[in-house]
Image: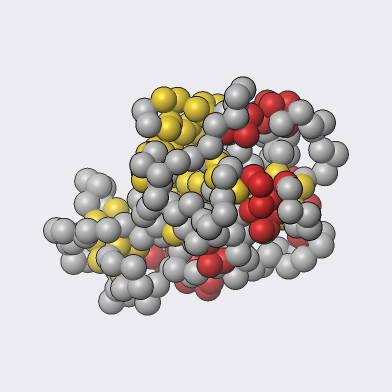
Amino acid sequence: MKFLRFGELGAERPGLLDGEGRIRDLSDVVMDFAGPTVSNEALAELAAIDAETLPLVAEPGRIGACLAHVPNFFCIGLNYAKHAAESGLDAPDEPILFSKASSALSGPNDPVFIPRGSHKTDWEVELGVVIGREASYVSEAEALSHVSGYCVVNDVSERSFQMDRGGQWIKGKSAPTFGPVGPWLVSADEVPDPQALGLSLTLNGEVMQDSTTADMIFSVARIISHLSQFMILQPGDIIATGTPSGVGMGQRPQRFLRSGDVMELTVEGLGTQRQEVR
C-alpha cells in the first residue's frame, strides 16, 4: 500500500493511493502519519480498508512530506562503495551514524532553499526506512520485521558547514528544506528486497546519480541491527541509508547547487521527487 499526505503546508491530510493510482482521503480514519500511526500494526489496519469506500480526492494539490514529523531523523554516511571511493575515503568498518534536525523535514516537491552563507549545497538521493516497531538489541535476521515502510529521501547537504566548520555533520545536514521525504510511504510488504532497488538523481535533466541499493556497504538489516545496539528505535523514526556516487562534492571539478537548479530523484517503486533550488 502507498500512503501519502496532501494539502498546503501545515494543513496536510492523510491519504492512500487506490488500485488505479487515485488519492483517497483517510482523514476520517487516522489523524495523520507520524509515530504510532505508522507502526506495523497501524498500517496493516489501514491496508485492510476497502479503498473504494473512502472519499476520492479529485484535486489533491500539493503533496506533503509522507510523515508529519519524526521522533528521530537518522542518516548513514559513506554507505555506498563507489561514493566512499569518490570521496577519497576508505569504506568504514561500521555504519557511520549522524542525524538531521527534524525541522529539516520537507515535502517531496517543495523548493529547496540554499541557507545563508552556503557555497557548497549538495544533493543525495537515498532510500528512506521508516521504523514500525520498537527495536532494541535486534539481530540482522529480525531487523526488517521492525520496518513499516520505505520512502525516497533527498539528504540535502551543505559541505562547507559539514566538513569545514568542525564538530558534528548535523550542522551541514539540517537547514530548513534539507530533508525532502516522499511522495509516498510504501508499506514494507511492497518492498520484498530493499537491497535490489534502483535509485537515481538528475540535475537540470543531466543524470548525476544512477545506482542500486546493491552497492550498499551495510544492508538495511545491518543498519537497523547496528543502531539498535546503542539506542531504542521508535515507530516513526526515519533512517536515510546513504547515497550512491555522483554527488556534487565528488565531481571534478566539484559542482554545487545554484538558484534555479532543478533536482529530480527516484527510488524504484517508491516514487519521484522534484525540487527547484532557491
Along the line of sight, which residue is nearer the eye, 74 or 148? Answer: 74
Tell me how many marks there are: 0
Question: Residue, x 53% and y 57% (percent of image)?
Answer: 116
Q: Quadrant of residue 250?
A: top right
Along the line of sight, which residue is nearer the eye, 1 or 3? Answer: 3
Give the x, y percent position of residue 27.
Answer: 30, 73
Left/right of residue 94 with respect to residue 75 in the rendered view: right
Relative to 162, does residue 25 appear above or below in the rendering? below
Relative to 126, does residue 180 appear above or below in the rendering? below
Left/right of residue 98 with respect to residue 40 in the rendered view: right
Give the x, y percent position of residue 276.
Answer: 36, 45
Relative to 248, does residue 139 appear above or below in the rendering? below
The residue sitting at the right extreme is 93
Give the x, y percent position of residue 267.
Answer: 47, 38
Q: Can residue 189 be seen from the camera position used here? A: no
Along the line of sight, which residue is nearer the eye, 226 or 241? Answer: 241
Question: Residue, x 82% and y 44% (percent of image)?
Answer: 94
The residue sitting at the top extreme is 252
Give the x, y percent position of residue 187.
Answer: 46, 53
Along the line of sight, which residue is nearer the eye, 73 or 110? Answer: 110
Q: Quadrant of residue 55?
A: bottom left
Question: Residue, x 50% and y 69% (percent of image)?
Answer: 69
What kind of colouring is applied to the model shown?
secondary structure
Q: Can residue 27 be seen from the camera position used here? A: yes
Left/right of residue 29 with respect to residue 226 in the rendered view: left
The residue sitting at the front extreme is 117
Q: Quadrant of residue 3?
A: bottom left
Relative to 237, does residue 219 appear above or below in the rendering? above
Question: Residue, x 36% and y 54% (percent of image)?
Answer: 110
